[in-house]
Amino acid sequence: MIEVRGLGKSYIGQDGGVVQALQDVDLTVADNEFLTVLGPSGCGKTTLLKAIAGLIPWNEGDIFIDGSPVRGPGPERSMVFQNFALLPWATVLENVAFGLQMRGVGKTERIERARALIETVGLGEFETKRPGELSGGMQQRVGIARALAVQPSVLLMDEPFGAVDEQTRRLLQEELLSIWEEHRLTVVFITHSMEEAVLLGDRVVLMSARPGRISEIVPVPLTRPRSSDVGALERSGKYVEITAYLWDRLRDMHEERRPAKAGR
Amino acid sequence: MTTATTHRRARGAATTRTGPVEARRPCPPRRLLGANLPYQLLTFAVFAVAWEAYATVWGGLLLPTFTETVGATFQLLGTAELWQAMYVSNQALVIGFAIAVVIGVPLGIVLGRFRALERFADVYLNILLVTPMAAIIPLLMMSVGFGLASRVILVAVFSIVMVVVNSRTGVRQVDPSLIEMARSFGATERQIWTRILFPGALPAIMTGIRLGVGRAVTGMVLVELLMVSAALGGLILEYRGLFRAPMLYGTIVIIVAEALLLISLARWGEHRLTRWSKATTARSTR
């Protein structure tokens, strides 16, 4: 279980003023829940994720994972990055095994575990390739395999499919759903796509910008498993209704921030 | 307007064929034109002919013809004197350059990682980069003497700047998200250095080593010319004193050949070690 209590983070912006990146963020993520976080750019959603990951400090509040406070990265959490963050000089196998290597897993075991996950994400024949030889979608499959290889109970995903094309993105979403249905882990998934947030999440956390805070938490009462027939799900009334609602809310946020037109 | 368009289209049709064309490898002459070597050989031939003509017409005591120089070069290669000089000179080169790499690479990585340090170091690096090194030779002589040590130091000082500056650039080019990724998997600071920063900076480090080799050869010859008149530099001075121009030029040819060989070797190593990086050859020197 992830508990975020009264989280606040501010920093000094380029113009010297204080920017409130996060303010009074309270959030509880249940075990094995798939939580998606949606919001306009600059709403602090990535900051929130990095705070949970233990990668950045914050000013107020606390974060607990299964009751113990976050003081840095931990073995129960692993992260998938928007720009993949693969080592360009290392092969697919070495990249997937990287997390295990950092955690001191012996060579034989880490190769074995890495190979199993490379199979899971369907990259078996690309084991010896380097990231530069792979497409964006394949690179992110490596990123996901690397995160899963350390057998986390919490998977933190920072707009993982934001940098791949639409068709690949849909395939990756379905694959992620079936991986999650099989492995059952807690996922916090950042996105800027309403459709993605609804398709994947049990709940959608809607964040607003300046200051970054949680504006609403929208439950997604769609049945699971969803990976088997994504198409039918996307045509269902509930799905359409929730995405439309989320877009209404997001558009309001954008309207508020739009600069007043000159001369009116 | 209309005539211009049709005209252009007609011309285009004449030069490039469209429609179904069978894919094939370029024929041998085409491939030859794509390589660098033919052009290099061509310019060299033009240069050699021009040299020969100029020296034959206007040449004198201090300007041998191209053929005389080539002859002298081969004659030199047969003398024990040259190989003795090569041995002595290269001692300074090897030791000096090794020191430059051993100190320069870690220094560059540290400077690249910690920006605060750079504020202190930047001015000294610039001094190293722009100071005419000949100016410090008398200083070196006074403090260290005429021996191997002063030649080694000069070679090291000459070449270290390229190694440091390029290693520093290399570390800065490492994607910060890789460091974040490593930290998220619990990497220690040491692991970040050995698993992320060093391999990430390696292409630039190798570029620095290649450029450093060139500077090291310059330093090696310069110190012998200006300071100790030993070895290869000594040979140059000796032949100049005796007005044996072909031998003088022959010595220079041999030094240039050695430098080119070392640089090619470094480039080869660079390509082998850093095949993943496509930007290797395009990387700037600073």
Image (cartoon, grey):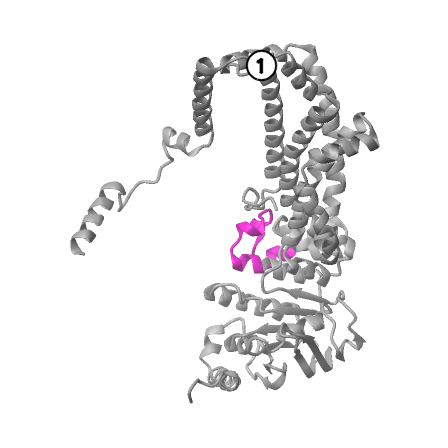
B67 with respect to B196 (left or right): left
Residue that appears at 22% across and 44% down = B11
Tell me where residue B136 appears, x and y as whole percent: 74, 35
Is residue A118 in the magenta section? yes
Q: Is residue A170 above or below residue B143?
A: below
* Residue tagged 1: B245
Q: Is residue B192 visible?
A: no
Magenta stretch: give its range.
Answer: A114-140
Q: Position of residue B278 (x, y in %)?
A: 54, 46
Instruction: Determine the chain carrying the residue at label 1.
Output: B
Magenta segment, principal secondary structure? helix
Provide residue B274's location: percent of width, then percent of height.
61, 42
Task: Report x, y in % for residue B69.
Answer: 54, 14
Please name whichever residue, B282 or B74, is drawn nearer the observer in this view of the structure: B74
Q: How many marks?
A: 1
Does residue B54 appear left or right of residue A20 in this picture? left
Q: Find residue B227 and report its image quarter.
A: top right
> In this rendering, is residue A75 above or below A30?
above
Q: Secondary structure at mark 1?
A: helix
Report the amino acid beneath label 1: Ala
Whether residue B41 is visible: yes
